[in-house]
Image (cartoon, grey):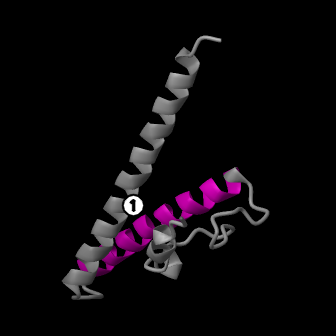
Amino acid sequence: MAIDGISQVKQLIPDNFRISGIDDQGKASGVSFGEYLNSALMKVTDLENHSDQLKEDFALGKTDNIPEVLIAGEKANIALQFTMSIRNKVVDAYSEIMRMQI
């Protein structure tokens, strides 16, 4: 019995949220873990920079699109929270491995 439900979920992910170097089957296409991690962190940084730029433009009166400014800020905040939760899980996993007795 094949379970293919996850493949349908992948179709819902927008292209700009996909990490480069990972194909549709989840296999790495010649990209190291470090490059993958760097790519993900760069996307978070880009979201934060975009949010900061929109806030600055709003403060200077260059834009009056308040919803766009707020949405960009929330996207950056959610991305940062997600990144920190992953970091915490990695630290917890490392700590657990270090406590294991051989």
Q: Residue furthest right?
A: 30
| Callout 1: SS | helix
- Classify the position of the C terminus by image quarter: top right
Does residue 60 appear in this view? no
| Viewer-nearest residue: 16 or 61 | 16
Residue 54 on the magenta span: yes
Give neighbour class at mark 1: few <14, some 14-19, many 20+ (Cα, 10 Å). Answer: some
From the image, tell me which residue sits under label 1.
79
Q: Which residue: 55% across, 60% down?
A: 40
Residue 77 lies, with reference to residue 68, above or below; the image says: above
Tell me if 87 is positioned left or right of 75 in this view.
right
Disc 1 marks which amino acid? Ala
- Secondary structure mostly taken by the magenta-highlighted segment of the chain: helix
Residue 77 lies, with reference to residue 59, above or below; the image says: above
State the image coordinates of residue 80 (x, y, percent, origin top left).
39, 55
Q: Residue furthest front?
A: 1
Q: Which residues are magenta?
A: 34-60
State the image coordinates of residue 21 (x, y, percent, origin top left).
69, 68
Residue 74 location, quadrant: bottom left
Residue 60 lies, with reference to residue 52, above or below; the image says: below
Q: Which residue: 56% across, 24% down?
A: 97
| Viewer-nearest residue: 40 or 10 | 10
Question: Total marks drawn?
Answer: 1
Residue 28 location, quadrant: bottom right
Q: Which residue: 75% across, 66% down?
A: 29
Tell me if 18 is positioned left or right of 70 in this view.
right
Residue 18 on the magenta span: no
State the image coordinates of residue 36 (x, y, percent, origin top left).
65, 58
